Image (tube, helix red, strand yellow):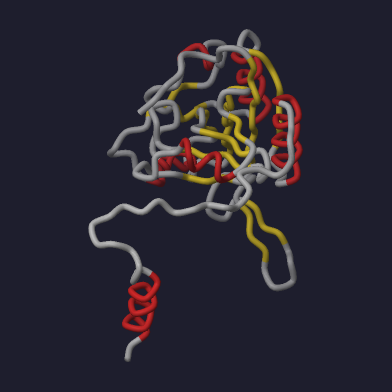
Amino acid sequence: MSSRERVLGRVRRALADVPRDEDVPIERTYLRKHGQRSVEETVDLLAENLADYRAVVHRTDAAELPDLIMRLLAERGSQEVLVPPGLPPEWLSLADATRVHDRAVSTPHELDEVASVVTGCALAIAETGTLVLDGSPDQGRRRITLVPDHHICVVRVPDQVVSSVPQALERLDPARPLTWISGPSATSDIELDRVEGVHGPRTLEVVLVSGRAGADVTG
């Protein structure tokens, strides 16, 4: 008997008491979040865990967001910035960098020539310090957040912040191309020497913005 046959046999035995053609709900008895926190405490936990993963965290409001993004790009010396198709135009209204729009014909080498990318996100998870992108118009295709060396990700607070992974999964569409980001790209060898920028941005800057930071984008 092959491994495949053994696994399928176990599945059949586990489902033996389930009537055919009947959708039986699965009982989920695990905790949906750990502890009780206010909105402010949840956002503070997100910021703490993002920083623990070596992301650089900024806080601002919608009115100051364009100025902050301008300064972050200027500090990096970014002369070009990659822009998803649905990024609110006011976010980059003060930036001096040239906008580079993602195109299907763009090669990885061409994307690698762009220093920075600015995106929104689908959700941010406080307990794990994780950003989730789902390919919506303000986030663009997965590759534009994996090739440039510097990623600025804007999180609308508190609308896009959840406490836990179970809460995030309830709001995310599993059919979308989900990218889960916990800090800048990094890996370690057997001696625990950390190397950043291996398979994604070397620098991740997260902007927690309160107020209405551009129109909500769904896709």
Q: Is residue 94 left or right of residue 193?
A: left
Please name whichever residue, 20 or 192, is drawn nearer the observer in this view of the structure: 20
Above or below residue 134? Residue 66 is above
Quadrant into which the N terminus falls: bottom left
Q: Residue 93 appears at what percent x and percent y?
A: 52, 11
Residue at 70% x, 73% y: name it: 190
Dividing the picture into quadrants, the one containing residue 135 is top left
Please name whichever residue, 151 or 114, is drawn nearer the observer in this view of the structure: 151
Q: Is residue 177 left or right of residue 153?
A: left
Q: Residue 155 appears at what percent x and percent y?
A: 58, 27
Please name whichever residue, 164 or 199, is drawn nearer the observer in this view of the structure: 164
Quadrant into which the C terminus falls: top left
Residue at 31% x, 52% y: name it: 23
Q: Residue 159 appears at what percent x and percent y?
A: 57, 23
Above or below residue 47? Residue 177 is below
Residue at 28% x, 62% y: name it: 19
Above or below residue 154? Residue 148 is below
Please name whichever residue, 79 or 186, is drawn nearer the observer in this view of the structure: 186
Residue at 75% x, 45% y: name it: 52
Q: Residue 216 appears at what percent x and percent y?
A: 46, 18
Q: Is residue 82 left or right of residue 65?
A: left
Q: Residue furthest left?
A: 21
Q: Is residue 41 left or right of residue 8?
A: right
Above or below residue 46? Residue 200 is below
- Total numbered badges shown on the rendered structure: 0
